[in-house]
């Protein structure tokens, strides 16, 4: 399981109604607080909902797919 921390940027399965799909994590714990980078609206998701919906995370300026998250040099 990935560890998410405040300040991480992620995309979700569905974007925000404003058209943006780019979120910053503002709070972690049992519930996750996210800020839409498009309109700055803040939402709360339960951690379970968040883990179901999260798709990509920004790591060192690269978008890493959560589903296929593994080191690049592990390709066979
Ligand atoms: Zn938005």
Image (cartoon, helix red, strand yellow):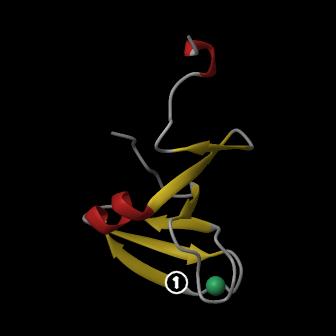
Q: Foreground residue, 73 or 7?
A: 73
Residue 24 screen position, x and y as percent: 58, 65
Instruction: Decide: is 19 above or below 59.
Output: below
Q: Quadrant of residue 28?
A: bottom left
Instruction: Decide: is 18 above or below 46.
Output: below
Tell whether 43 sits left or right of 38: left
Q: Residue drawn at (26%, 63%), measured in percent from left and top?
A: 48
Residue 25 screen position, x and y as percent: 51, 64
Tell whether 49 sits left or right of 71: left
Q: Quadrant of residue 39?
A: bottom right
**Which residue occupies the extreme right position in the image?**
61
The residue at label 1 has a CB less than 8 Å from ligand 1:
no
Instruction: Decide: is 1 above or below 24.
Output: above
Residue labelled with disc 1: 42
* Number of marks in the rendered image: 1
| SS under mark 1 | strand
Figure quadrant of the N terminus: top left
Tell whether 33 sits left or right of 7: left
Q: Residue drawn at (68%, 74%), measured in percent from left and top?
A: 37
Residue 47 screen position, x and y as percent: 30, 63
* Ligand 1: image quarter: bottom right
Residue 62 screen position, x and y as percent: 71, 41
Q: Crowdedness of circle 1 by 10 Å Cα count: few (<14), some, many (20+)?
A: some
Q: Residue drawn at (49%, 45%), measured in percent from left and top?
A: 66
Q: Residue drawn at (62%, 14%), measured in percent from left and top?
A: 73
**Which residue occupies the extreme front position in the image?**
76
Figure quadrant of the C terminus: top right
């Amino acid at each position: 399981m990935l560890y998410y921390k405040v300040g991480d940027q992620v995309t979700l399965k569905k974007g925000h109604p404003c058209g943006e799909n780019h979120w910053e994590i503002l709070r972690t714990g049992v519930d996750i607080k996210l800020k839409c980078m498009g309109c700055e609206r803040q939402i709360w998701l339960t951690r379970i909902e968040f883990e179901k919906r999260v798709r990509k995370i920004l790591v060192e300026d690269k978008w890493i797919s959560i589903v296929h998250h593994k080191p690049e040099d592990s390709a066979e």
